[in-house]
Image (cartoon, rainbow, N blue to C red):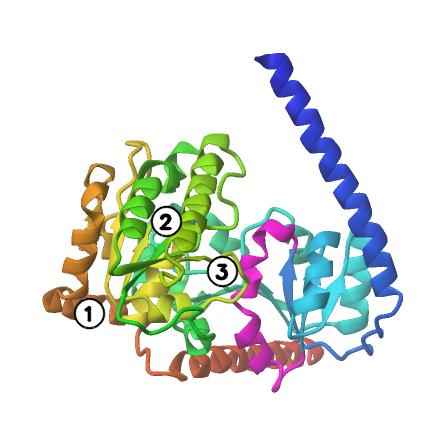
Amino acid sequence: MPILRDVQTAVRLGRRLLTARGNRRDLAKRLSTQPALAPGSIEIAVYFADGPVNLYQVRQWYAPLAELATIHPVAVISRNPGTMLALLDESPVPAVYARQVVDLERFVDEQAPKIVLYVNQNARNFQMMRYGRMWHVFVNHGESDKMYMTTNQFKAYDYALIAGDAARDRLSEALWDYDLDRRAVAIGRPQADHFAGEPPYPADGRTVVLYAPTWEGDRAAAAYGSIATHGTTIAERVLASPEHRLVYRPHPRSGVTDAGYRAAHERIVAAIAVANTADPAAHHVYDDGPEMGWQLADADVAITDISAMIYDRLAVGKPLLVTRPVSAEADVDERGYLAAANWLRAEDTADVVARVDAAAHDEAELAELRRWVTRYFGDTTPGTATGRFHAAIEQLLARWHQVAREREGR
């Protein structure tokens, strides 16, 4: 009913307003005790204009940024008070609050960064990109074959750090008159060098199934989320098996636009709690923590939607199933890995345990996976991607100094 929807919308807006006011008040107190950055002390900035719900996009860069900061000073710029509060608690590099454009101007004047990195395509990126005398570099927050990965917005940045040959081929086909050889630099997946954390369950012989679905999307072409179509049955079947363990790690935005999707998510969370109560030795996991690594590396089989999680799992080189979107309008690009994916359709989820067991022991599929790993990420030997990331940064800094000298010599 329209009146009920209007009331619900008003309540949501009221809650957001109260939360925002509280965040601004708390942040003002925190910032009053934070030491100011010395002028000219930041060489590389990471620009992040989003709210807390999208913090996962910058969190996965924490470890690579922390390592980079041992060579070149790095800071994260936040535009949102809730995000800034979280960054103050968890970022391994300094965080700078720039709520207004005038704050950005002050940061640029005082710090004069040489490189600004962007982890997403937020429209507010352009408020930072108006400043010259620095390289604006898109690094993204994941590798995938989603339509997001071939947006013409790549052209807005001076350079892009991409994963590998698959990304290069996607951009070459999608973008007109884009100088890939000059503007796109392949670095692999440096985050994979920092997969960390210990699994919160014993090594007891159970087959560990990671179910890592994406959110429902904000338009029909991006409706890749499987929680409402596949997820409840996947959870039901895996939780019912005494030989399997479920690790459920949904996208942080799951259910933000679709109440039915959120309800399905909540049913899975509740089912995990019930299953653990019935069998405390099962150690099924609902994982919504900020740390990412053990989930991908430890699971025997992963079930993912069309999202960056596919490619993070590929970098591990272990079996995975990919949920097939139910919506005929979902844009599924099957020119890359998805052409060879082990698809799990909604109508097949009742047999998901058998599908998991088959995937876990299919040597031919594992050999095929290794071929795709090379195509998407190149050499995945530990440390190689980090080395390529650092080399790309050094090249950009060298180019910055070259251009600066040329301009000074005019």
Q: Which comes before the other along the chain, label 3 or label 2?
A: 3
Instruction: Please state which of residues 250 and 280 is positioned toward the viewer in this rendering.
Output: 280
Q: Position of residue 352 (x, y in %)?
A: 22, 49
Quadrant showing the N terminus: top right
Q: Is residue 227 above or below residue 402?
A: above
- Where residue 371 is drawn, which disc sits there? 1
Instruction: Please state which of residues 104 and 286 is positioned toward the viewer in this rendering.
Output: 286
Work out how far the residue at label 2 is from the one at label 1, CA to CA, in angstroms.
Answer: 20 Å
Q: Residue at x 30, y 39 (%)?
A: 325
Q: Type of residue at label 1?
A: Arg
Q: Is residue 179 above or below residue 386?
A: above
Circle 3 Cα neighbour tier, 10 Å, few/some/many (<14 / 14–19 / ≥20): some
Inspect the magenta stretch and tell me whether residue 60 lies in it.
yes
Q: Position of residue 233 (x, y in %)?
A: 30, 41
Helix, strand or loop at label 1? It is helix
Residue 342 in view, yes or no: no
Circle 2 Cα neighbour tier, 10 Å, few/some/many (<14 / 14–19 / ≥20): some
Quadrant showing the C terminus: bottom right
Instruction: Please state which of residues 165 and 227 is positioned toward the viewer in this rendering.
Output: 227
Specify the segment rendered in magenta.
Answer: 49-73
Residue 397 left/right relative to 260: right
Residue under pointer 3: 140
Q: Which comes before the other along the chain, label 3 or label 1?
A: 3
Instruction: Please state which of residues 143 and 298 is positioned toward the viewer in this rendering.
Output: 298
- Where residue 32 is drawn, which disc sits there? none
Residue 72 in view, yes or no: yes
Q: Which comes before the other along the chain, label 2 or label 1?
A: 2
- Where residue 146 is drawn, which disc sits there? 2
Inspect the magenta stretch and tell me whether residue 302 lies in it.
no
Work out how far the residue at label 3 is from the one at label 2, CA to CA, in angstroms.
Answer: 13 Å
Q: Position of residue 211 (x, y in %)?
A: 35, 54
Work out how far the residue at label 3 is from the one at label 1, CA to CA, in angstroms.
Answer: 24 Å
